[in-house]
Image (tube, rainbow, N blue to C red):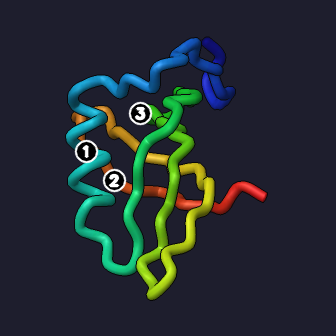
Amino acid sequence: MVVGTWKILDNPDCKLPQKLASAYTDLLGSMLGAGYTPMLYAATQLVAGTNHLIISKQTVVTKDPVEHLVYVIIYEDLDGKFSLTQINTIV
């Protein structure tokens, strides 16, 4: 794998590795105004650590809930600590 390039994963059942699944829940589960469900663990990017790209369903909490497809990028540093980097709507 070349540093900085995205590696597309062959993961049709969207199984997140246990540590990443826990980080996803911790980082996105406490957000106000929207709920997130992972749909596809799509790609990884080797940087000074690893970026994980997860296609997710975002449900905005309103009187009539609105759903969007988004991509979430979670960064894992070299010590194994996770942080949320991006949430972007897929148009």
Name the side, left or right, on which 91 lies relative to 62: right
| Mark 3 secondary-structure assignment | strand
Query: Percent from the top left, x then y, of residue 75?
Result: 41, 44
Label 3, label 2: how many angstroms apart (C-alpha)? 11 Å
Q: Are marks 3 and 2 in contact (CB under 8 Å)?
A: no
Position of residue 54 relative to residue 9, above or below, is: below
Name the side, left or right, on which 2 lies relative to 50: right
Mark 3 against mark 2, which lies toward the viewer? 2
- The residue tagged 1 is 23
- The residue tagged 2 is 83
Query: Percent from the top left, x then y, of residue 9?
Result: 57, 17
Q: Amino acid at mark 2?
A: Ser
| Mark 1 secondary-structure assignment | helix
Q: Amino acid at mark 1?
A: Ala
The outermost residue toward the bottom is: 63
Position of residue 2 relative to residue 32, above or below, is: above
Q: Quick one: label 3 or label 1, which is nearer the N terminus?
A: 1
Position of residue 24 relative to residue 42, above or below, is: below
Position of residue 89 relative to residue 65, above or below, is: above
Label 2, label 1: how many angstroms apart (C-alpha)? 8 Å
- The residue tagged 3 is 49
Task: Name the residue rendered at 61%, 61% in the picture.
Answer: 68
Query: Percent from the top left, x then y, of residue 42?
Result: 57, 29
Q: Quick one: label 3 or label 2, which is nearer the N terminus?
A: 3
Q: How many residues crowd around disc 3 within 10 Å: few (fewer than 14), some, or many (20 or more)? A: some
